Image (cartoon, rainbow, N blue to C red):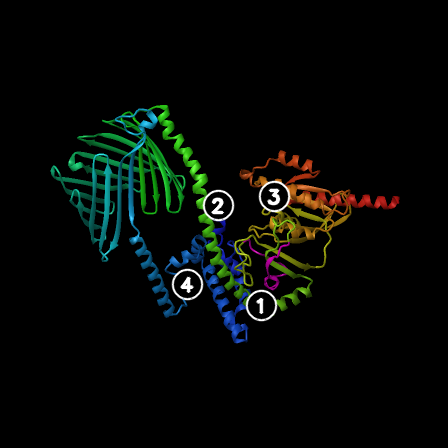
Amino acid sequence: MAGNYEAELEAGEDDRLEYYTLLNTDQHATQDDIKSAYRRLCRIYHPDRHQDPKKQATAGNFFRKIQEAYNVLIDPRTRAIYDRSGKKGLEDDLALVQRTTLPSELINEYERLRAQWEERTYIQQANPQGNFQMEVDATGLVDGQVYYNQPLLYVKSINVQQSVDAEMTKSTFGSISGMLTASQRAFFGGMQFSLRQLIDNQNWIKVSALAGSQPALGVDSYHSLGTHMYLTTQSVMSLSPYGVVLAANGSLTRRLTDSTMATLSVKQTGNAVSTQVGHKLSLTTEVIGEVQVGYQSSYVKGSIQYKPTEKYSFRSGVKVGTKGATLFCGAEEQVATLTCLGGTVLVGLNEGVVLKLRLIRASMNFQVRIQVSQEVSLASLVYATIIPLGLYACLRVFAIAPFLQRQLLKDLQNKREEILQEALAKKAEAEAAVDLMQETFQRAVESEQAKQGLIIVEAWYGKLFDLQADDQPYQPKIVDVCISLQCMVQDSKLILQENTKVNIPGFYDPCVGEKKHLRVRYEFRGAPHEVTLFLGDSTVGKTALAQSFTSDGTQFAKSYNMTTSVDVYVKTVTIPNTKVVVELYIHDSAGNEVFSDFVQEFWDQPNLVMAVYDVTNEQSLKSCTKWLERVKAKKITPELQLPGVLVGNKVDLVQRRVVTEEDARKTAQTKELEYFECSAKDPEVVDKPFLYLAEQFYQLYEQSLDKTKTV
């Protein structure tokens, strides 16, 4: 269910189609198409076309939006930015179209953005950063051996640290933190005060003072040594029961290539020297190698990190040195926007089996180190791997998933409320747009009536019915868009792009967050006879086949415009080896499931049927069975013969084909259909299923004449 909520939240956030929808074009539109759409809208919304001052003001608001969309889409550079990044990309682009905003409005906008930035900075600084570390000994629980009357499971040490940063000036930053460490043998606590001063954009120095059980004074620095190199140093002087202790560390980091970084470090006041090299093999894979030579410890370490997505990360490696060999393997998951969970298992001869758990929540870091066993055994590995994974699976199912779903529902509700407020404003805007269309609407209707063209009788947009309501009465949530669609008719054709319709002038969203439908009732050259029905899922190529056949291959739709009801095509066919001519009325029905209820209203006593599926989409073949059952229900009598064909379209996409010809023929045989394969791009092959249907219709006609003569 969470996936549906996420999809609903994301719906409408991508504004890369808004300008295209406003002009009723698609992303494949040419400059001539955009100019034509702009001129058509100017005839309706240009302020000079209205005499009423109120209508002039309303038209001016619409005209500014239309002009903004036109200016962006007519310029190849700004159109490329808009197609890639939407309005956000245009806002980030400094050389946008000429601005018409008043200076006072620009000042107010600047002040608003500055206030938002200051508030966001204050929240970030005031939000404390924390680190919690705990070490647990579980060897007694796993190994079954208890020493010195210790419990089976106990905490060896705890370390807690909390800090808050503050910007004192533009170049000076202060920090205050508290820390507490407790173990079985010692207790330590203190407060640390730090002051970091920016020397320039590439260098800084920080001074820290620690007050507590062991007072200390430290100095850290960062120095840029060029474009690809920098140096960091840390030095600490502390007081202990044994006297003054000095410690110093330093590291030099250099970028060798675009994907390789190298670091040389001096640790423990010169007691250890190490070098580390990291190299990115790809965008998802990185390898790291490290060598250390020291007085107390020397080792060689290698690891690989794989991050297939932003949500998951995996890491494994090996470490071999003077203290033995250790294998480690871990994984992390981004369970929420600000929450990350991870775990690592270490297996070594000296370390035994260790499990490290990590939780990151915003700026808080929680780490738990569990000593599972001092020895490597099958039982200890089970305790360190299988049992934690099982517990995490249960935690995810019964705690994390319900929590995330509640958060998602809460975000969805907030989003709905925001969209609802916008919808109310869009409703008023749509009503104003319809008012401006009245004169254009009357002229469009008169023009179409004169040539018996396309006249929109009724058009409704919204949630027309509830499929889950059973027999309960349902009140449709719809808006009348008859006037808006009639004004979009050109040359007796209505083309709607497969985008969201709410940005079309005269449309608005009457049911926020719910599935919407578009019902259109129209008149087109009277009531045509039913001859052939086109059925199947959307985008399988039914319309392309019809256009290619009726135009003798001169028309092929290279861009997809979804059929929203039933389109009618007429084609005259001569039966081979005869002088008989059959006139086919081809009804191209919408394949999208949301139109299934009302496209059937156009299926009045069908004579023939053609079911079309996409050879690159296995589900479209399965859907043909569903559509065929709906057609058979429209026959005059159940005994009436209904010849038909099953057509596999898009056979030109050989590399993407998933449905074999053998499987499709078996489906056709079970449904008593003839089988054909074709591509709408090849007119010679397209003709074959149509000619077969014409011959079948002629045979039925001859049979009916024979029966009449017999009577």
Circle 2: element type: helix
Q: Is residue 544 left or right of residue 96?
A: right
Quadrant housing the C terminus: top right
- In the orientation shown, which residue stands out farthest toward the right? 711
Mark 2: amino acid: Ala
Q: Nearer the viewer, mark 4 or mark 2?
A: 2
Q: Which residue position holds label 1?
A: 437
Q: Relative to 45, is 402 above or below? A: above
Mark 4: amino acid: Val
Circle 1: element type: helix
Q: Nearer the viewer, mark 2 or mark 1?
A: 2
Dot 1 surroundings within 10 Å: few (below 14), some, or many (20 or more)?
Answer: many
Label 1 and label 3: CA atoms lie apart by: 41 Å
Q: Is residue 666 left or right of residue 131?
A: right
Q: Nearer the viewer, mark 2 or mark 3?
A: 2
Q: Nearer the viewer, residue 44 or 358?
A: 358
Circle 4: element type: loop
Q: Nearer the viewer, mark 1 or mark 4?
A: 1
Task: Pick whichever of labels 4 and 2 is earlier in the sequence.
Answer: 2
Tell me the chief SS of the magenta region: loop
Give me the disc on residue 97: 4
Q: Relative to 67, is 269 above or below? A: above
Q: Which residue position holds label 3?
A: 679
Is residue 474 part of the magenta span, yes or no? yes
Task: Pick whichever of labels 1 and 3 is earlier in the sequence.
Answer: 1
Label 4 and label 2: CA atoms lie apart by: 40 Å
Q: Is there CB contact under 8 Å for labels 4 and 2?
A: no
Dot 4 surroundings within 10 Å: few (below 14), some, or many (20 or more)?
Answer: few
Q: Which residues are magenta?
A: 473-498
Mark 3: amino acid: Ser
Give me the disc on residue 2: 2
